[in-house]
Amino acid sequence: MSLSDTAIRNAKPGMKPVRLFDGGGLYVEVAPGGGKWWRLKYRYGGKEKRLSLGTYPDVSLKAARARRDSARQQLAEGEDPSALRKAAKATEQAKALNTLETVGRAWLKHRSSAWVARTRTMIAASLENDVFPKLGERVIDGVQPGDIRALVQGIESRGAGETATRVFQRLRAIFRYAIAHELLETDPTYPLKPSEIFRPRKTRHRASLGERDVPAFLRKLASYGGDPMTQSALALLMMTATRPGELRGARWDEFNERAATWRIPASRMKMKTEHKVPLSKQALTLLAEMRQLSGDGPLVFPSPFYPGKPLSDGTLNSALARLGYKGMVTAHGFRTLFSTCANEAGWNSDVIEKQLAHEERDEVRGAYNRAQWMTERAKLMQWWADRLDALREEAQVLSRESSE
């Protein structure tokens, strides 16, 4: 005998649960408190089991029958409806834990030791202000390329192009982190190329030499009348394309001249990640000369005025001003010179970026770098030292011609 809505509505609670059967194992259980629950009784694996199908009247008689029929179809296919429901619930719970914001914060925690406090705060703020409010509640494997494009273009449209680029880079890092932890199979940022989603904009660099200016500069540097350690520091800075602060604080125990490498510890790097610099033959020769000047102390370039301390922050730029380049060239600009020349010569951009220790950009462009590209970087730095030699020879030729 089948149930009717009237019979269910009129069913009164008793001292014990009352069951009203409909058919196919479906019944309504009227609790002593008056609540009415849909249940399905079935057998699976030789055992009698029950499955809750909701409460009446929230789940109507018609809806309860549809749920019963769906469960019985699963049984006919050899599946346990209760087990399937538990698995589906577990999947939904897992998805709830794998939102973009949850994974993004896990990435922030994972990477935080690589950043100084100010950088960490800035990166977290960019996600909290621009990403989490819009996409934070989305399950990470549900974020589409179009969602990311719309997000970063929206940031760019308010005049924050640099922020948009950095947010895009950080999203790429978060999605790669999710892939590494098996929370995601495909990176939705992969099809998106910055040049295709962002408007072209002019990049402002530190004041720098152009390649055509290098011969004249090298000629002036060769005749520099100031402190010889400052002169050598400028020369080595050009050869290694390191940051001025990294070079000024260089210590002899960081150099392995036999292996032709300079290992700069994380504590002295901008991104707080150890950086290994391959040394050209010319750089090794210059270091050998420096050992005659400062090899008795721990610092390669000690201050001539304050023993035990490195060259001051303004020493290199002051020397450049003395050479006639005040406001035209900065010590940091040698990195731009190197990057421009190497890129124009056709060197692999990932190798160039790794040599420049652009760690955050490497995360975007070099996810599969092997051994820090050391073999390629060693070739690159020897090419660069040879190129500087050629430009120095050009300077000497120009100097002889001008004196004739």
Image (cartoon, rainbow, N blue to C red):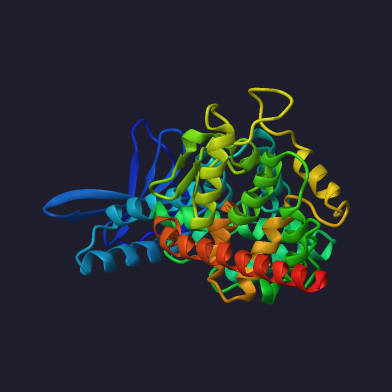
Q: In the figure, is residue 388 to the left or right of 354? A: right
Place of residue 26 in the rendered image (x, y in percent of width and height, measured from the top left): 32, 57
Q: Is residue 400 left or right of residue 339?
A: right
Position of 372 relative to 399 (above/below): above
Q: Position of residue 335 (x, y in %)?
A: 67, 57
Which of the two residues, 110 or 87, is positioned nearer the viewer here?
Answer: 110
Whether residue 138 appears in this view of the structure is no
Residue at 54% over, 28% down: 298
Q: In the rendered image of this protein, does residue 287 appear above or below residue 352? A: above
Q: Quadrant of the C terminus?
A: bottom right
Does the image show residue 327?
yes
| Residue 318 picture location, percent across and down | 82, 43
Residue situated in front as seen by the camera: 232 or 83: 232
Which residue sits at x=64%, y=75%? 344
Tell which of 82 and 120 is nearer to you.
120
- Residue appearing at x 63%, y 64% in the figure: 388
